[in-house]
Amino acid sequence: MTDRTTPPARRLLFVHAHPDDETINNGATMAKYAAEGALVTLVTCTLGEEGEVIPPELAHLAADRDDTLGEHRIGELAAAMAELGVTDHRFLGGPGRYRDSGMMGLAQNDVPGSFWQADLDEAAGHLADVILDVRPQVLVTYDDNGGYGHPDHIQAHRVALRGYELAAERGYTVERVFEICTPRSVVEEGFRRLAAAGKDFPFPSVATVDDVPGVVDDALVTAAVDGTAYAGHKTAAMRAHATQIAVDGPFFALSNDLGQPFFSTEYYRQVRGEALPRGADGGPAPDLFPAYGASGSASGPASGSVSGSVSGRASGSASGPGGGAV
């Protein structure tokens, strides 16, 4: 439970599928807001038990051997959150309540107790409990394809939006919900930077734009949070997830060994709530809150709202790029 005697003025809730997803996608944002005194809460839906393991000396942790990777990743997540300055991190329904479902199409998708098989309202009810405890103004999660089609990411999206609805039914409405995204122009520039590294590139193979989750047209981006000042914290947190991420300078790779560029500005698309005012230059807002303070200034009032609904249990299939670590 949070201490409501002196609640921070700004409160954010991030909903992610596995340990390490939060750092790769939102590490700089989380570190920035935590450093500024906002309450940053992370809910992780599984322990990531089915992830592939990068360091050979830890290969025994894998699901097809000792099956102790999930417990190990609890420690990795705690270390990563310490690097980001985040003190409120929780597992949906408690540690181990939902098991990692593996990549789409694998037998693990159908295992009882896997997150992909979770009853939507039950899982979302756990998240609604967190929402009512924390009372965040901002909720962040994946798009409806989970960024790249992983079943747990898709389910995290569904649980986040359904949890938003259930919390509203119970008396508290989160002001704005955002999906994680990256503008195509930024990804393309990142890969040009990667190509320019030439022989200094540290990984044996190179990813492509299609391997980056959540790439969207630039016009769809609502907010761009500049976390450059916190890039070191994000890098350190990525290193803490040592079973899943290899970091070398401004690049990183998952277990597929495909090098990718590192981004310290992180991007969001609003999908619920009163529309966030655009930035002073008419581009994406520089903040996930409408009062930009030192980070920028709003240009005029927000206009309109963004709304929708989610229903039903997990079903069907999805596919997309991305590979290796989960």
Image (tube, rainbow, N blue to C red):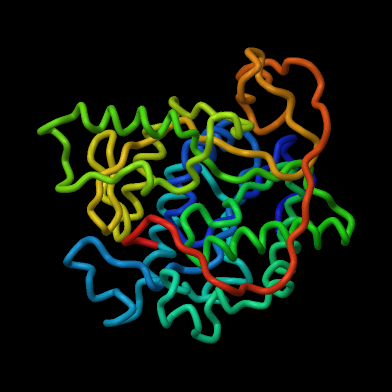
Q: Quadrant of residue 264?
A: top left
Along the viewing direction, whichever of 96 and 251 lies nearer the viewer: 251
Where residue 125 sits in the image (x, y, percent)? Answer: 74, 69
Along the viewing direction, whichever of 186 and 16 lies nearer the viewer: 186
Residue drawn at 56 percent across, 44 percent down: 180
Q: Quadrant of residue 160?
A: bottom right
Outermost residue toward the bottom in this view? 112
Is residue 93 found left or right of 303 in the rendered image?
A: left
Q: The C terminus is located in which quarter?
A: bottom left
Along the viewing direction, whichever of 166 and 293 lies nearer the viewer: 166
Is residue 221 found left or right of 51 in the rendered image?
A: right
Where residue 4 sits in the image (x, y, percent)? Answer: 78, 48
| Total number of numbered discs in the rendering | 0
Is residue 147 found left or right of 125 in the rendered image?
A: left
Residue drawn at 65 percent across, 49 percent down: 13
Along the viewing direction, whichever of 25 and 67 lies nearer the viewer: 25
Outermost residue toward the left in this view? 199
Q: Is residue 232 above or below residue 131?
A: above
Where residue 276 sits in the image (x, y, percent)? Answer: 73, 30
Q: Is residue 269 above or below residue 300?
A: below
Q: Is residue 223 above or below residue 66?
A: above
Residue drawn at 61 percent across, 74 percent down: 315
Q: The N terminus is located in which quarter?
A: bottom right
Is residue 190 found left or right of 316 in the rendered image?
A: left
Where residue 191 sits in the image (x, y, percent)? Answer: 30, 33
Q: Is residue 47 above or below residue 87?
A: below
